[in-house]
Amino acid sequence: MRKSLQLQADMTQEFGTCVFDVTLDCEDGAPVGGEAEHAALVSELALSATAAAPEARIAVRVHPVDHPSFDADMAYIAGRAGRVLTHIMVPKVETVADVDRAQAALITAGAANLHLHVLIESPAAVHRAFDIAAHPRVQSLSFGLMDFVSAHGGAIPADGMGIEGQFTHPLVLRAKLDIASACHAHGKVPSHCVVTEFKNPEAIRMAAQKAARELGYTRMWSIHPDQIRPILEAMAPSDAQIDQASAIILAAQAAQWAPISHAGQLHDRASYRFFWQLIERAHQTGRRLPQEIQLFFTGLGHKARLVS
């Protein structure tokens, strides 16, 4: 965890913005019998990291709502460190009632404004993904590939968890599409599952490109520091896309956001939103932006809201 936080700080300095979140793990990270001590540890790590770097983006994954340590996790972590966390991740969410319980725990802990990210990890949860995504406290849905495959009792073969099978097996592919669709229907962020082949950067890059370009995911989990740069590169807009979007947004700004003609094509507020979102994604992934566009993020951000 400390290495991940240090890498985040180093890459924030390199790119000029925080380009990935660090999620400190209580579900799989806490030893059995040591859950309370681990909750205290992740809380202190989050507090110390954000004290040193206020721009740090740190979250915590707690135990599932039906685990004996869930309430204690939420009470201590949200109560102690909720003010510095970007969100709390709740695994194995099955129903809207699970989200309601997590929300109630946040309110009790005095962290009423903290967002929830949820992991969708079973066929039943995928079935309810649209209802879960509609919950106002939920900011993002993540797909839990390995638990999803395991939940099928052998009906999906083991290679459904691999780099090829997770993009070709119909049940896995359908689940990914349903989760992404649910998120976009309710303005939430779809986060793609892990790739276990962490020693193969090309496999990571290919998975991230497929997730972003074919399935509509805008974020992706990593399980190893070596995966972070390939994911960022694959999910970031290309230089050509950034140049096109920048030219259109600057021309639109000059026209007071009225319709314009650019390269023989008509653009109006609908396409301005698209190209502004592309520029935001470029900024969030540490891509270099033209100086005039960079001003939107360093003092002229009020103008950007005109196209949102």
Image (cartoon, rainbow, N blue to C red):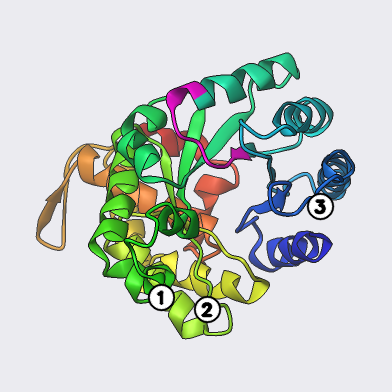
Task: Please say if the residues under marks 2 and 3 sit with CB atoms less than 8 Å apart.
Answer: no
At a point 79% along the width and 59% down the height, the residue shown is 1
At label 2, the amino acid type is Glu
Front position in the image: 41 or 84:
41
Q: Which image quarter holds the C terminus?
A: top left
At label 1, the amino acid type is Ile
**The magenta stretch spans which residues?**
89-97
Front position in the image: 87 or 26:
26
Please tell me which of labels 1 and 3 falls first in the chain: 3
Distance in Å between CA atoms under marks 1 and 2: 7 Å
Q: Which residue corresponds to mark 3?
A: 31
Q: Which residue corresponds to mark 1?
A: 163
Please tell me which of labels 1 and 2 falls first in the chain: 1
Magenta stretch holds residue 54: no
Front tag of 1 and 3: 3
Q: Position of residue 63 (x, y in %)?
A: 67, 39
Above or below residue 131? Residue 171 is below
Report crowding for label 2: few under 14, some 14 to 19, many 20 or more residues within 10 A (C-alpha).
some
Q: Is residue 130 left or right of residue 112?
A: left
Q: Which residue corresponds to mark 2?
A: 197
Distance in Å between CA atoms under marks 2 and 3: 25 Å
- SS class, disc 2: loop
Q: Position of residue 195 (x, y in %)?
A: 49, 70
At label 3, the amino acid type is Pro
